Image (cartoon, helix red, strand yellow):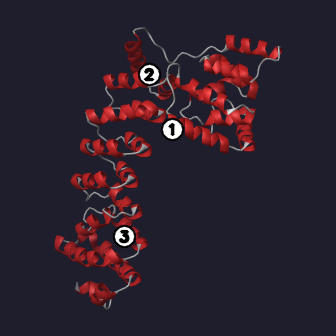
Amino acid sequence: MAEAKSLIPGLEDIVRNGDPARRGEAVRKIADLFLQGASRFQPSHVDLFDSILTSLVPQTEVEARRTLAERLAELVNAPPQLVSMLVRDDEILIAGPLLRRSPQIDEPTLLDIAKVKGQPHLLAISDRPMLGPRLTDVIIRRGDREVIRRVAGNAGAIFSQLGYHGLIRRAGDDGALAVTVGQRDDLSAEQLKHLLAQSVEVVRRRLFDTAAPELRAAINRAMQDISGAPQHLGLTRDFASAQRTVRKLQQSAELNEGALLRFARAHQYEETAAALAAMSGVRIATIDQLLKGDRDDPMLILGKSIGISWATVRALIALRVGPGRSPAPHDVEEARQNFSRLVPATAQRVLTFWQTREPTSAIPS
């Protein structure tokens, strides 16, 4: 305490009577002193700083606490009571750095926070380099879509059987999550089969296209088990016949929104892709990539740029999930709202980009 008193005249008065600004300045100076000597401090020294800082920090401004949390987040001997106070803060700017990185926070503390705090705190916890199954169980049970996607993509997260069941269930109406889960190294063959069984065709193909060779073989084996017949998701679609059909419609002036809607509602994938290519001037291989992607946005952009109605765009979205399945209602409503807000000029600019790019180029959505 003597060093702190000499560094900050009137420290005791600041602790008792200081306003947030004076307290914040005192916290900064004391934190500087601690960080300069942290590598050589004994536990008694750390306890001393802990007692001083915990008496000052609660009445400081958010920015002062955020800066302090950032500076302490990587220290193995940060003042423990102070860290415990900051990591439970309702303000994610303060708790977040510690939740993501602090080696001082044990699993029981993380569990307590994960059970009661909101989605920003769960998202921060999901970024930790290691997560045990008890913690991921809570995250999967309480997390929203962004949180679930983040924890599924964390290679250091370990999932229980119950946790994997929850992940796969949530992936049933989230193609991006299904692809992320399907790429995990710790996914068992049985879990992969369960994931594929409930996934729509476009997600299966997306997963196959992004998979390493050994995973591609596992996907085909799982699909064979599901269908009882050999499956080869890697086979390239043949659009030649569909293009001839669409060319005939063009020649007879019958290629219009009605024809496109009939193809989409009948789940005639190749004919739909060929019609979209002819109506938009985009290469059919690029249209195929857009249809197989994990987002609906390209369908909205195509629809707005070629002037078709929401009913036809909705049929294109339904085509992507395959026959006998329906997209999640909240996803459809979100797509409808985005379609209504989409400015035709903006859609046309993206369409022009697609028209001039090779199909292997990055496709914005």
* Tags 3 and 1 touching, CB below 8 Å: no
Give the Cα separation between the discs numbered 3 and 1. Answer: 40 Å
Q: Which mark is residue 290?
A: none
Residue at 34% across, 45% down: 142
Q: Amino acid at mark 2?
A: Arg
- Point out residue 144 in the picture as x, y percentages from the top left corner: 41, 45
Badge 1: how crowded within 10 Å, few (<14), some, or many (20+)?
few
Q: Residue furthest left?
A: 44
Q: Which residue is mark 1?
A: 330
Q: Which residue is mark 3?
A: 68
- Point out residue 359 in the picture as x, y percentages from the top left corner: 65, 29
Instruction: Identify the secondary structure beneath mark 3.
Output: helix
Q: Amino acid at mark 3?
A: Leu
Instruction: Report the side of 295 relative to 21 (left or right).
Output: right
Give the Cα separation between the discs numbered 1 and 2. Answer: 31 Å
Residue at 56% across, 31% down: 293
Does residue 123 lie above or below 27 as drawn? Answer: above
Q: Which residue is mark 2?
A: 216
Question: In the rendered image, which quarter is residue 262 located in?
Answer: top right
Nearer to me, 225 or 50: 225
Q: Reading the chain from its start, which is encountered first: label 3 or label 1?
A: 3
Does residue 280 lie above or below 11 as drawn? Answer: above
- Point out residue 85 in the picture as x, y percentages from the top left corner: 28, 67
Does residue 150 lie above or below 118 as drawn? Answer: above
Badge 3: how crowded within 10 Å, few (<14), some, or many (20+)?
many
Nearer to me, 45 or 108: 108
Which label lies toward us, 1 or 2? 1
Instruction: Report the side of 324 relative to 169 (left or right).
Output: right
